[in-house]
Image (spheres, grey):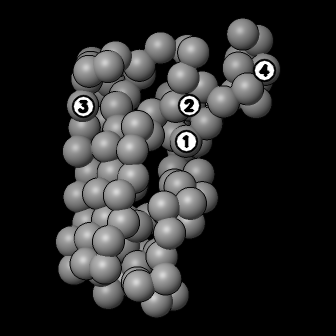
Amino acid sequence: MSVSNLSEEQVQDALRAVVDPEVGMNIVDLGLVYGIEVTEDHIYVVMTMTTPACPMSTYITDSVRHTLRALAPDMEDIQVHLVWDPPWHPGLMSEGAKTTFGW
């Protein structure tokens, strides 16, 4: 895929392959991805975890980087920025995720 043709929606769709192994749900539907910026030379993802004490945070952020590198192997700069504000809450999940978890 040409980097110049890459959209934020394509990045978001690719990130659906990244699953939080503690809950078995992808990070997009969990509401962990707060923002995506794509330019000609970088992809910047702002995301969070369900809790600051998440033992899988390194695994998940590494999976995000790996997924984005596979999507855009020629991209010069791929950054994943982990934030805690605003804190994650179940209201950020997709309707499908809420249904899956019975909320």
Q: CA distance from mark 3 to mark 1?
A: 15 Å
Amino acid marked by disc 4: Thr
- Residue 72 lies left or right of residue 41; in this view the side is right
Cα distance in 3D space between marks 2 and 1:
5 Å
What is the crowding at mark 3: few (fewer than 14 residues within 10 Å), some, or many (at least 20)? some
Task: Specify few, some or many for label 4: CA neighbours under 10 Å numbering under 14, 14-19, or 20 or more.
Answer: few
Q: Which mark is residue 30?
A: 2
- Is disc 4 placed on a helix, strand or loop? helix
- Mark 1, residue position: 28
Amino acid beneath label 2: Leu
Proximity of marks 2 and 4: CB atoms separated by less than 8 Å = no
Compared across the picture, whether 56 is left or right of 93 comes to: left
Q: Can residue 59 be seen from the camera position used here?
A: no
**Which is more toward the observer, 16 or 40?**
40
Q: CA distance from mark 3 to mark 4?
A: 26 Å
First reached walking from the N terminus: tag 3 or tag 4? 3
Percent position of residue 11, x then y = 49, 62
Which comes before the other along the chain, label 3 or label 1?
A: 1
Q: How far from the left and from the top, in percent, is residue 76?
A: 22, 80
